[in-house]
Image (spheres, rainbow, N blue to C red):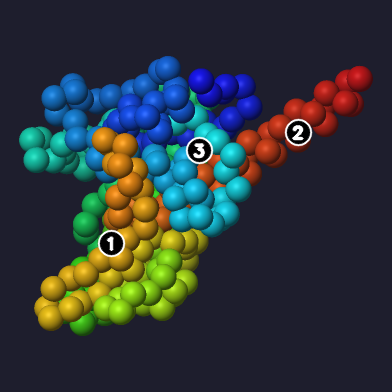
Amino acid sequence: MVSYSWYPIVGVLDSGIAKNTYLEDWLTAKSFSSYPDERIDRTHGTYVSSIILYGDDLESEGRTGNSGVKLFDATVFPDNEIETIYEDELIENIREAIKSNDNIEIWNLSLGTGIEAGLKEFSDFAIELDNIQKLYKVIICKSAGNCQNFKSGRTKGRITKSADSLRSLVVGSVAHKKNECDISEPLHPSPFSRIGPGPAGVIKPELVTIGGNAGINSGRTIINGVQAISPDGKITKTIGTSFSTPRVTALLSELNFRMALITLLWNRDRLE
C-alpha cells in the first residue's frame, strides 16, 4: 500500500476518477461528487489523473520531478451523453468542491466551454473562477481549450471562456513528437491548442507542455497522442490541452509541497 505521509494533494475537478490498479491506492479516502454513479463517465477524469501521477513514466521523460501525489476526486461534471450541464451549474459544483476541502491548495481543471473568450471583457466563468481562488486561497491549473480549425486550414482560435481567468494558471499544448502526417514540429504549438491573448491583452496561456500532435491524411484527421491510463487500467493515447494541463499541475503541486516542507523545517530549526 502507498504511504501518504509525505505527498502533496491535488484536487481533480473533472468527470471522476476510476479506482483501477494504478490509481486506487493514490486516491484520498474522502471525495466529492455532484452526481450519482449512474450519471458519471470517469474516462476523462481518469486520463487527467493518470497524467498527474504518472506523466513522467508514461512518456519516459522527467518533466515534473513528481515522486507521487494524492488525488482528491472532485466529480463536478456528469456523463454528457446522459445529462446536460450548464455553465452556472458547473461553477457552483467547482465552488462547493473547493469550499468543502480547504486543505487542498492546488486544483486541476481540464474542463471549460467551447466558446471563444472576448478581447475586451472577461467572461462570467473566468470572473467566478477568480473569485473562488481569491476567497479560498487556491490555484487552479486550467486548460487553454482545443480548436478544430486546423482540419480546414484556418487560423487557430483564441482561448475559450473560463481560460481567460486571471488567477488561474492557464496551460496550452505543444507537440511531443512528429509522425509523417503531423502538422507541428516537436515542442512547437500543437495544431489544436488555442492561443492568446486574453481580454485586455493579458498573456494567456502562461505555460505550455506536451499534449499531443495531429494532422490530416486524405481528408481524415490523424491524431498522435500522449499516453494516459484508461478506467480499465490500459494504456491509451489522447490529445488535448486537457492532457498538457495535468503535467503543470503535477509540477506546481511538487514545488508547492517542497516549499511548504522547507518552511516547516526552517521554522522547526528556529524553535530548537
Residues at marks 1 and 2, CA–CA distance in whole angstroms: 38 Å
Q: Residue furthest top?
A: 29
For image coordinates 33% across by 68% down, the residue present is 213
Residue under numbered circle 1: 146
Q: Picture coordinates of residue 221 (x, y %)? A: 18, 71
Residue under numbered circle 3: 106
For image coordinates 53% across by 24% down, the residue present is 2
One can see residue 41 in this view: yes
Q: Are marks 3 and 2 in contact (CB under 8 Å)?
A: no
- Which of the 4 image quadrants contains residue 199? bottom left
Residue under numbered circle 2: 263
Residue 86 located left or right of residue 43: left
Q: Picture coordinates of residue 190 (x, y %)? A: 36, 70
Residues at marks 3 and 1, CA–CA distance in whole angstroms: 23 Å
**Quadrant position of the C terminus in the picture:** top right
Label 2 secondary element: helix
Amino acid carrying label 1: it is Asn
For image coordinates 56% across by 50% down, the residue present is 64
